[in-house]
Image (cartoon, helix red, strand yellow):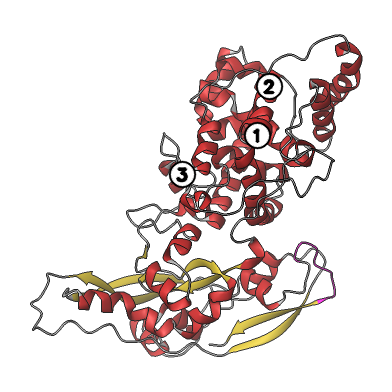
């Protein structure tokens, strides 16, 4: 019904407004949170030192003069939004508040908008894959633009963090770990998964996407208060006046982003490419302490770049993890990482020894629940132990294990002890784990409805990134049934 009203309004507007001056857009307050995130994006060190700018003079796709900032009558905006509204489950209403945010993106913060158009090439493929897996509207990817201006290091005044701006409590509720060294709210994949689950829960509560978006910003309690104060109304614009002030611009900004992403070229706006696009990225797995500076030195890149790609690790240190951790790196440094991994494994320990610090080890017990298809060899390899140790710790007489079985794993965790005099012998580093087992390459026949996620889950130890790396010639968004896809399976 909302889409029909908007489309009819767009068709009638040209006649109704022919003799009227366009109504001015509402002024945004100086402390508007969307404006604050755009300004934060503009002052990032890697943008300030970037030689590329949003100069569109050479593109000139629509015949605009260099640096021209086009503007249109409000009926044009209404018509364009009505057409977009007809293609989405969201109600893309046009009004003066929405126009204020369109002006923000299209006129007042053009440089940042061009940056976001470029960053979309890096992050939108991740968002779209997760939204598709959860069967949620694709337009929700634009929510991260409103929340963080696509800056994974973004932090609001209230303490919300990351691309999806999770508060600490909400992040932990949806499985995001936060401590002094690690903040998974910055992790692109994990935070996107958490955002999908949270938005799905909010939509289940309110049965309306606009109210779900408002609740994502200010919490379901505040939206329920607004509904009660409005007399039980359940339409965003009817409860608008009762929402917290910082939330009132939230849905209008989301509508404006839908518009600007579809009509950027009509405003002489074009993407400024980020340093790395999604297809230029890869992941490496580590299960030992690691300084990003050591990884940079071993792979020929810079610690600053690795920190930008991995803001999850707040102090540039991967602490000793219970499970393998994924680090995001440029794909052209993966070979150097694999070649130098043995020395990287002990770089952190050696640095402490050189500093005159003694490293003691304390036993740390981990419980692993066996998944279907896992073997003792695979579990041992992932945890840096031997099959014999696994069998000893768990009283096993054979290599046979069952899905759901709980296995106890003892790992030596480094603990900083009091510094010793230089003449004393420093503690030896922990023993090197066994070399990785061989990888066997098999071919999986794609079935109707298969996604990379489905295929990866069928083979233990295989990730979506592994499949993409081994099958770069495939169209990952449209897998063709009957085609074969290469899979690398680790042998136990």
Q: Residue at x 76, y 66 (%)?
A: 450
Front of the two marks 1 and 3: 1
Residue 483 in the image: x percent, y percent?
Answer: 83, 76
Query: Gap between marks 2 and 3, in whole Å?
Result: 29 Å
Residue 72 in the image: x percent, y percent?
Answer: 79, 26
Which residue does the numbered mark 3 point to in the structure image? 161
Query: Gap between marks 1 and 3, in whole Å?
Result: 22 Å
Q: Secondary structure at mark 1?
A: helix
User: Which label sits on residue 179?
Assistant: none
Indicate whether 190 appears above or below 331: above
User: Which label's residue is closer to the chain start, 1 or 3?
Assistant: 1
Indicate whether 268 appears above or below 101: below
The answer to whether residue 8 is seen in the rendering is yes
Q: Residue at x 13, y 85 (%)?
A: 425
Label 1 crowd bin: few (<14), some (14–19), many (20+), radius 10 Å: many
Quadrant position of residue 458 = bottom right
Front of the two marks 2 and 3: 3
Q: Secondary structure at mark 2?
A: loop
Magenta region's main secondary structure?
A: loop
Left/right of residue 404 with respect to residue 181 in the rendered view:
right
Residue 449 in the image: x percent, y percent?
Answer: 79, 63
Q: Secondary structure at mark 3?
A: loop
User: Which label sits on residue 235?
Assistant: 2
Query: Gap between marks 2 and 1, in whole Å?
Result: 26 Å
Indicate whether 207 appears above or below 303: above
Tell me the magenta residue range. Answer: 476-483
User: Which label sits on residue 105?
Assistant: 1
The residue sitting at the top extreme is 19
Q: Residue at x 83, y 45 (%)?
A: 61
Left/right of residue 359 with respect to residue 300 in the rendered view:
left
User: Which label's residue is closer to the chain start, 2 or 3?
Assistant: 3
């Amino acid at each position: 019904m909302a889409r029909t009203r908007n489309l009819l309004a767009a068709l009638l507007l040209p006649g109704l407004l022919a003799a009227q001056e366009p109504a001015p857009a509402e002024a945004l307050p100086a402390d508007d949170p969307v404006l604050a995130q755009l300004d934060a994006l503009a002052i990032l060190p890697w943008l300030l030192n970037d030689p590329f700018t949003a100069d569109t003079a050479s593109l000139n796709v629509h015949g605009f003069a260099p640096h021209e900032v086009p503007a249109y009558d409000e009926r044009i905006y209404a018509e364009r939004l009505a057409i977009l509204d007809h293609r989405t489950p969201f109600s893309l209403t046009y009004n003066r508040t929405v126009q204020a945010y369109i002006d923000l993106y299209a006129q007042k913060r053009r440089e940042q908008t061009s940056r976001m158009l470029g960053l979309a090439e890096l992050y939108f493929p991740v968002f779209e894959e997760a939204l598709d897996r959860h069967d949620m509207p694709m337009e929700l990817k634009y929510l991260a633009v409103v929340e963080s201006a696509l800056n994974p290091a973004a932090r609001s005044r209230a303490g919300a963090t990351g691309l999806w701006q999770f508060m600490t409590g909400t992040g932990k509720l949806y499985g995001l770990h936060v401590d002094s060294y690690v903040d998974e709210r910055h992790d692109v994949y994990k935070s996107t998964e958490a955002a999908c689950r949270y938005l799905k829960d909010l939509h289940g509560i309110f049965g309306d996407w606009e109210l779900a978006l408002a609740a994502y910003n200010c919490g379901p309690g505040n939206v329920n208060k607004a509904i009660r104060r409005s007399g039980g109304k359940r339409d965003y614009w009817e409860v608008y006046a009762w929402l917290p002030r910082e939330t009132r611009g939230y849905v209008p900004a989301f509508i404006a982003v839908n518009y600007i992403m579809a009509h950027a070229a009509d405003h002489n706006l074009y993407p400024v490419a980020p340093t790395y696009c999604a297809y230029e990225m890869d992941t490496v797995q580590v299960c030992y302490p690691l300084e990003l500076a050591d990884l940079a030195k071993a792979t020929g890149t810079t610690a600053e770049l690795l920190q930008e790609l991995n803001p999850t690790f707040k102090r540039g240190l991967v602490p000793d993890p219970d499970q393998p951790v994924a680090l995001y790196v440029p794909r052209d440094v993966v070979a150097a990482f694999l070649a130098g991994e043995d020395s990287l494994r002990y770089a952190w320990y050696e640095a402490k020894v050189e500093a005159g610090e003694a490293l003691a080890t304390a036993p740390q017990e981990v419980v692993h629940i066996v998944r279907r298809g896992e073997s003792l060899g695979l579990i041992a390899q992932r945890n840096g132990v031997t099959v014999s140790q696994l069998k000893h710790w768990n009283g096993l007489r054979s290599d046979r294990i069952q899905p759901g079985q709980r296995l106890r794993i003892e790992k030596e965790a480094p603990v900083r002890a009091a510094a010793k005099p230089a003449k004393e012998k420093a503690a030896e580093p922990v023993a090197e784990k066994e070399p990785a087992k061989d990888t066997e390459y098999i071919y999986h026949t794609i079935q109707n409805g298969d996604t990379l996620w489905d295929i990866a889950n069928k083979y233990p130890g295989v990730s979506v990134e592994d499949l993409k790396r081994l099958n770069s010639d495939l169209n990952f968004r449209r897998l063709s049934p009957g085609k074969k896809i290469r899979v690398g399976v680790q042998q136990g």
